[in-house]
Structure formats: structure tokens, C-alpha cells
Image: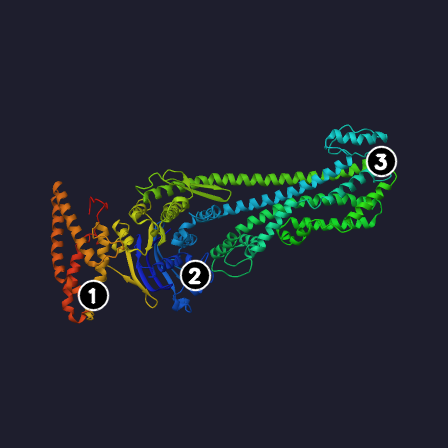
């Protein structure tokens, strides 16, 4: 990975032209909301990855690269918008420059264009997660278990694990459905055979007993054992076969059909009602139906994605990442629809069982009608069977189920009006036939038994094959899930340990025994955290929003550590540290310094106090921080620099603009006094609104530093440290001198700013005021690094 040395941003988002020297160090950019901080993050992210996460995902419909990435005045001239980064690559010990234009986001210019350098940039381009914005941190914490699993696996580049699991689960479900159909067909064939044989159970002894009674009557050899090749009517040809029609068996088939027709209104009632309820839900929410209709298409499209061109519509996307994100969002949107789809297909399989049973009875009776030359009955039954076969096919697919509401509402069987009459007439006709002789009855009994036994054997073979396929699919799915969970558990154990460590560190002294548990299972990832040793609960159960945000940042850092290890060298944190409670931000700085000493964090914040806390904690310095004080559409961010404020004031005075110089000085003094009051633990009179005037803050800051200097001198004397004592005494004396000078001139600033008596002051009058305050503020700076002094710890300090 890389570290950023410098950036040049031109006409990108709200930035007109801006240069920042990062120096490979952690860097803080502060400023009020709307001052352009996030534009810096967007620009860096764009240069590294070719995309801007803020313009992607939910709520960004209508935002495009060409129209909304350049500065608003340059949307018609995207070539003018570009970002250039100078970076250092630690693994190669090389520096390089990458420049990317908004007009050609997929064509960065890399110098030098060495293969190894290009490979590094290609890797970081594949990792847009190095950028974390405020709106993203809770996606790990409050997301549904399935969505959390997808998000985290995407960050860890484990997408294929979830995709493979989903494919195996789909195959398992389909094969289970096929097995249910095969079971229903085998059951129907068994009932048909049992009804003919007139036995209660399909046991070899009972079956052979029924067959051998007829064989003995015909003088045929008895069959002693039932095997897979046993033929019940063997030898009948030698005895003179006359017909396959058996009157008694035919009567039983017709009566069975008649009974089924009488009870047809109750058959499959539960399954049908569940299907209708699901269809009603789809009708009530058209968007759900759209998601369902497109789900399989989108899934197929995802499988075929290979580059930025959509395989479904041929539309060219900015890059493959954007295309995949678009299709994944559509899939996520149809999660509820997918569950409903699965329930409908399951109910359809139950209803199909009833259809198979009825078609089996109709098929048997149609043969009886054919044997008796009853063409009207045969045609009616065979037509009904064809209709039911079509229904069976519709019940087996989701698309088929969608059009079945009218059919299921009126009665799934759709029994022909003349069906009962035809069954009754056929029954009467068969009953009127003279009883067959014992020999003919035995002969036709055995022939029909053999036909039905053959059908049953074939149905059982199909059922066995379907069962084997279903079991194999389930075994494969379970084995994959078990292996996946074993590996993911090990991975998540590492992540949750780091996460807990990080969270305990930023909440030092509060949740000292905090623990967390990430539990993966079948595409889900449950997340529970300890709440003051009262047990493990979802993060949103008892923790405040601020603590949840802190968890999001800590989990992100734990994931990045797991993903990159020592190669985690850069991260862009856009206003996310605001989520950490104000009282814990110092510990957060220590977390970054302690656990990620080799990572360059570029942090934005709208809280000046937090920006100063980062400096006080040593996470950044005056040279590695930048403040925007405002923004205009014409100029972009307006930079406030501590180093340049005196130059700005001098420039105003050079032009005779005393009022501008006085306003700038007053503004800077208010800013510095507020920061120093926090750094040193000054004690102004408490105000609930926190709105302190300069005259309230600066005196308490001066008093506090004098107090600390006195204590420092006393401590140094007790340790017989003469040099330290002299330094403390010298600083206190200098402070007193400066304070006296500013007291003399204080009225000038007050009048200039508050009373608008600009005409009473000239350049020569105001220059001593500026010099006095500059000398005063220098007393509060470290002579070595230039940073503001701070006391630590904040309560009862033991060092300045």
C-alpha cells in the first residue's frame, strides 16, 4: 500500500484549486460544515480508486460522475477537473505520482509507469474501503445479520464465499422440491398398486400371497420370493392370455376417483390458502413483485459480469465495481421478496402433491373407459389430466404461481361439469358387466398387478435418485457451511478480539471488561456486545448512539487490520471520529498511535476542539493539520492557518484596512483562547451554552498557565532540577510581561471590533497591538515543534 506525500486538487467537487503537503504523516483537516473538508477526501478517494463513495449507494439515484464530480462551474468542462497525488510506497521504497481526470476516471496517469508501481495502485483501486465516511460506520453495527455478513465479507474480500453458499442453497432447495414431487408420484403409484392388490401394506409376503392365489387358480408355479426382477404374470402367455381388463380392480379405481371428487374441495386447502396469501402480499406491494421478477435476471447478470459493460442491457458503466454495486443493491432490495418466493414455491410443492394424486386416479379410470370403449368418458378424463399436468407445471415454478390466483380462487381442480356424471355412468356400466370367470379374473388380475408393480418400481427408482440428489445437495451445503463457519469463526475471533481491545481502549475507565461476539451462520453474522457485564446484547439494545458509532469505527479498524496487516498504511476518515464521545477522544488518539503507528490517517472534522485534541495528544502537529474557516462557490475552501494569520493581518494593515486586521486578530484570539482553555484545563466561569467571550476566556487561560508554571518550578526544585526550574520561572516572567503589555492595548481591539471606530486608528496605532498579542501567544507554544502547550492528565496534571 501507500502513504500520501502531497496532493494537488483542481476543480473537483467544491474545491477550485488546493495544494496540501501531507508528508506521509497522519493529517487533520478541520472546519465548519460546508467548508470543503469532505471534498478533500472525495478528491483523494477519486484519485486512488476512480470513484467517490458519496455518489454511490442508496439515496444517490440521479447522481452521475460526469455531472456531479467536477466543480459546479466546470460540469461542462470535465477535463479541467483532476487530482494529482504524490505517494510513497513503503514495500518498494519508491515514490510515484498518480493523476486522474474526472473526464477519464478509468485512465490514471502513473509516473513512473513501472509494473510494480502499477500493481500497487491496482491493489488500492480494488480497496475503496480505505475511505470511511460518517454515514457508513453504522452499517456494521445496526445492519441486519445477513446484510452485515455481506458488508464485512465484501471488505475482507470474501464475497465468493457468500455467493457459493447461496448457489449451493439454491441447488439444495430445487433438489428438495424435485424430491417431494418424486415422493408424491411414488406414493400415488403405491396407492394404485395397493388398491388393486387389496392389501393394507406393501409387504413382500402379502403381495406374493395375493398373486399366488391367482397363479394357483391358473395352474401356474407359485412365486417363492420377491426380487427386483420378479414378474407376477409370468407364464400367463402359456395359459392363454385373453384381456388386461379386471372388473373388480376397475370398480375399485372408479370408486376411488368418485370419493376423491367428493372431497376435492378440501384437498390441498391449506397449501392453496398459503399461496393465495402470498399472491395477495405481492399485489399489495408492486415494488416487491418487480424485485421478484428481476431477481433471477440480476443473479444471472452478476454471474456474467466481466468488466464495466452490463451483460443484461449492454450499458457501459464507469467500472466493474460500480456495476456490481448496482446489481448487488437490487439483490439486497429483493431480500424480503426472495423469502416470499421461497415460501410460495414450498406451498406450490404441497399443492402439487394433491394434483399428482388426482391425476393418478384419473389416469387409471381413463384406461377403464378406454377398455369399455366409452369415448366421451375417456376424452373427458384425459383432457382433465392434461389440464392438471399444466397446473402441476405452473405449481412447480414461481413464474407459474404468479398467474394462478383465478384458478386457485375458483378451485384448483377445475373439475369439468360432466365429470361426476361420466364417473357415475362408467361405474354403472362396469357393474353391469357379468362377473368374469375365475380364470379370467385371475389372469387379468395378474396382468394389471404386473403393470402397476412396474410403474411403482419405476417411480421408486426416480424417487431414490431424487432423494440421493437431495441428500447430496444438503450434505454439500451443510459441509460447506460447516467449513465456512469454522474458518469464519477463526477469522471473526481475531476481529472480535481486536474490536474489543480497541473499544476498551477508547472507553478507558468505563467499560473495562467489554467483550463482543461475532457469530456467523448460514450467510448471517450475528453481533452481540457486553453491557457492563450484564450479558451480551445487540449493540442498539442498551448502548447509546455515540457508543454505537464508536463501535463502528473500532470494528472498521479491526477489519482493516485483518485485511491488510502491516500493509494498512493509509485510511481516509471523513468526520467519523466525531462519533467517539468527546471525553474519549484522547484515548482514541492513543489507539491510533499505539495500534496503528505505521498507518497514515487523513481525518476530517467539523469540531475545532477535536482538531486541537488531536494536536494535544500528538497524533498530528501544527504542520500536519489544516483548518478551513469558510467556503464560497467562487473560491472553494478558505484556509485558516495559524502560521499565516500574522501574514494575513500584516497584509491587511499594509493596505490600510485596520478594521479587517482587527477582526482577524480578534477571531484568532478567540479561537486560540478556547483551545488553550481546553488544553490547560482553565477555569472560566461556567456558562451552560458554552458561548464564552474573549474577555472571559483569555484571563482564565493566563491565570492557569501562571499557576502551572509555579507548580512546575516547585516540582523542579523538589527534584533539584535547576534547568527545569529556571525554564518554568522564565516562562512565568515572560507571561507577566506580555500580559501587562496586552492589558495596555486591550481597549484598542475592543473599540476597533465592537465600536467600529476604525477611523480613529491607523496602521502605526494598531501594529503594537498585533505585536503584543503575537508575543503573548508565543508563550503558549512549544519552542521545539510549535504546538500549543497542554497539561496531562486533564484533571490533576502531572506534566505540561
Q: Residue at x 51, y 42 (%)?
A: 522
For the residues marked 3 and 1, what is the alpha-carbon distance in whole angstroms? 122 Å
* Residue, disc 3: 441
Measure the alpha-carbon separation of dots 2 and 1. Answer: 51 Å
Frontmost of labels 3 and 2 is 3
Q: Nearer the viewer, residue 469 or 87?
A: 469
Give whichever of 18, 650 is nearer the camera.
650
Q: Which residue is mark 1?
A: 754
Q: Which of disc 1 and disc 2 is earlier in sequence?
A: 2
Q: Which sits earlier in the primary sequence, circle 3 or circle 1?
A: 3
Q: Residue 786 at what x, y percent from top left?
A: 21, 54
Residue 675 can be seen, yes or no: yes
The x, y position of residue 264, in whole percent, is 71, 45
SS assignment at label 1:
helix
Q: Secondary structure at mark 3?
A: helix
Quick one: label 1, few (<14), some, or many (20+) residues within 10 Å? few
Task: Indicate which label's residue lies in the foreground, 3 or 1.
Answer: 1
Whether 774 is drawn above or below 466: the answer is: below
401 vs 795, left or right, is right
The residues bearing labels 3 and 2 have C-alpha atoms spaced at a distance of 86 Å
Amino acid at each position: 500500500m501507500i502513504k500520501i506525500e502531497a496532493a494537488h486538487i483542481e476543480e473537483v467537487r467544491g474545491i477550485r484549486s488546493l495544494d496540501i503537503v501531507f508528508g506521509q504523516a497522519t493529517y487533520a483537516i478541520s472546519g465548519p460544515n460546508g467548508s470543503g473538508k469532505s471534498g478533500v477526501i472525495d478528491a483523494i478517494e477519486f484519485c486512488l480508486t476512480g470513484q467517490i463513495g458519496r455518489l454511490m449507494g442508496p439515496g444517490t439515484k440521479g447522481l452521475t460522475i460526469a455531472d456531479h464530480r467536477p466543480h459546479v462551474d466546470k460540469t461542462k468542462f470535465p477535463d479541467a477537473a483532476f487530482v494529482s497525488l504524490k505517494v510513497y510506497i513503503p514495500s518498494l521504497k519508491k515514490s510515484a505520482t498518480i493523476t486522474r481526470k474526472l473526464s477519464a476516471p478509468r485512465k490514471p496517469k502513473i509516473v513512473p509507469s513501472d509494473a510494480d508501481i502499477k500493481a500497487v495502485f491496482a491493489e488500492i483501486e480494488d480497496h475503496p474501503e480505505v475511505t470511511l465516511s460518517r454515514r457508513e460506520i453504522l452499517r456494521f453495527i445496526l445492519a441486519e445479520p445477513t446484510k452485515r455478513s455481506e458488508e464485512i465479507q465484501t471488505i475482507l474480500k470474501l464475497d465468493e464465499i457468500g455467493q457459493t453458499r447461496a448457489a449451493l442453497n439454491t441447488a439444495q432447495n430445487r433438489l428438495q422440491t424435485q424430491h417431494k414431487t418424486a415422493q408424491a408420484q411414488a406414493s400415488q403409484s403405491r396407492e394404485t398398486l395397493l388398491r388393486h392388490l387389496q392389501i393394507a401394506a406393501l409387504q413382500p409376503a402379502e403381495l406374493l400371497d395375493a398373486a399366488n392365489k391367482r397363479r394357483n387358480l391358473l395352474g401356474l408355479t407359485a412365486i417363492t420370493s420377491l426380487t427386483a426382477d420378479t414378474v407376477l404374470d409370468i407364464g400367463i402367455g402359456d395359459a392363454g392370455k385373453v384381456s388386461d381388463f379386471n372388473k373388480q380392480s376397475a370398480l375399485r379405481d372408479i370408486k376411488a376417483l368418485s370419493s376423491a371428487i367428493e372431497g376435492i374441495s378440501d384437498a390441498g386447502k391449506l397449501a392453496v390458502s398459503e399461496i393465495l396469501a402470498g399472491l395477495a402480499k405481492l399485489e399489495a406491494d408492486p415494488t416487491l413483485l418487480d424485485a421478484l421478477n428481476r431477481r433471477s435476471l440480476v443473479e444471472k447478470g452478476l454471474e456474467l459480469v466481466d468488466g464495466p459493460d452490463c451483460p443484461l442491457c449492454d450499458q457501459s458503466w464507469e467500472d466493474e465495481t460500480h456495476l456490481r454495486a448496482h446489481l448487488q443493491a437490487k439483490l439486497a432490495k429483493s431480500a424480503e421478496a426472495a423469502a416470499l418466493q421461497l415460501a410460495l414455491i414450498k406451498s406450490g410443492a404441497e399443492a402439487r402433491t394433491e394434483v399428482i394424486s388426482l391425476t393418478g386416479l384419473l389416469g387409471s379410470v381413463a384406461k377403464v373407459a378406454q377398455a369399455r370403449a366409452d369415448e366421451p368418458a375417456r376424452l373427458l378424463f384425459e383432457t382433465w389430466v392434461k389440464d392438471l399436468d399444466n397446473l402441476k407445471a405452473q405449481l412447480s415454478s414461481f413464474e407459474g404461481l404468479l398467474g394462478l390466483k383465478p384458478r386457485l380462487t375458483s378451485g384448483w381442480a377445475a373439475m369439468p361439469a360432466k365429470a361426476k356424471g361420466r364417473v357415475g355412468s362408467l361405474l354403472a356400466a362396469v357393474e353391469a358387466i357379468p362377473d368374469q370367470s375365475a380364470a379370467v379374473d385371475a389372469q387379468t388380475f395378474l396382468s394389471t398387478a404386473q403393470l402397476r408393480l412396474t410403474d411403482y418400481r419405476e417411480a421408486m427408482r426416480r424417487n431414490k435418485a431424487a432423494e440421493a440428489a437431495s441428500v447430496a445437495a444438503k450434505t454439500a451445503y451443510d459441509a460447506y457451511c460447516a467449513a465456512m463457519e469454522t474458518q469464519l469463526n477463526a477469522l471473526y475471533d481475531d476481529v472480535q478480539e481486536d474490536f474489543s481491545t480497541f473499544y476498551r481502549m477508547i472507553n478507558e475507565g468505563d467499560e473495562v471488561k467489554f467483550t463482543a461476539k461475532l457469530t456467523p451462520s448460514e450467510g448471517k453474522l450475528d453481533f452481540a456486545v457486553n453491557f457492563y457485564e450484564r450479558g451480551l446484547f445487540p449493540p442498539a439494545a442498551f448502548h447509546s448512539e455515540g457508543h454505537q458509532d464508536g463501535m463502528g469505527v473500532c470494528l472498521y479498524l479491526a477489519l482493516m487490520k485483518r485485511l491488510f496487516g502491516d500493509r494498512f498504511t493509509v485510511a481516509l476518515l471523513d468526520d467519523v471520529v466525531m462519533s467517539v464521545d468527546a471525553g474519549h477522544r484522547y484515548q482514541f488518539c492513543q489507539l491510533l498511535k499505539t495500534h496503528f503507528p505505521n498507518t497514515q490517517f487523513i481525518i476530517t472534522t467539523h469540531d475545532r476542539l477535536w482538531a486541537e485534541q488531536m494536536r494535544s495528544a500528538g497524533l498530528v502537529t501544527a504542520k500536519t493539520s489544516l483548518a478551513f474557516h469558510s467556503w464560497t462557490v467562487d473560491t472553494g475552501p478558505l484556509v485558516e492557518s495559524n502560521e499565516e494569520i500574522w501574514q494575513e493581518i500584516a497584509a491587511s494593515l499594509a493596505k490600510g484596512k485596520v478594521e479587517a486586521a482587527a477582526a482577524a486578530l480578534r477571531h484568532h484570539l478567540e479561537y486560540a483562547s478556547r483551545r488553550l482553555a481546553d488544553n490547560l484545563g482553565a477555569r472560566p466561569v461556567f456558562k451552560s451554552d458554552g458561548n464564552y467571550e474573549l474577555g472571559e476566556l483569555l484571563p482564565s487561560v493566563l491565570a492557569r498557565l501562571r499557576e502551572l508554571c509555579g507548580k512546575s518550578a516547585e516540582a523542579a526544585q523538589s527534584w533539584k532540577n535547576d534547568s527545569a526550574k529556571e525554564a518554568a520561572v522564565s516562562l512565568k516572567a515572560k507571561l507577566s510581561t506580555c500580559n501587562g503589555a496586552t492589558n495596555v492595548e486591550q481597549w484598542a481591539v475592543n473599540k476597533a471590533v465592537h465600536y467600529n471606530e476604525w477611523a480613529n486608528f491607523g496602521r502605526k496605532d494598531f501594529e503594537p497591538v498585533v505585536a503584543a498579542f503575537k508575543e503573548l501567544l508565543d508563550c503558549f507554544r512549544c519552542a521545539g515543534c510549535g504546538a500549543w502547550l497542554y497539561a496531562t492528565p486533564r484533571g490533576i496534571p502531572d506534566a505540561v
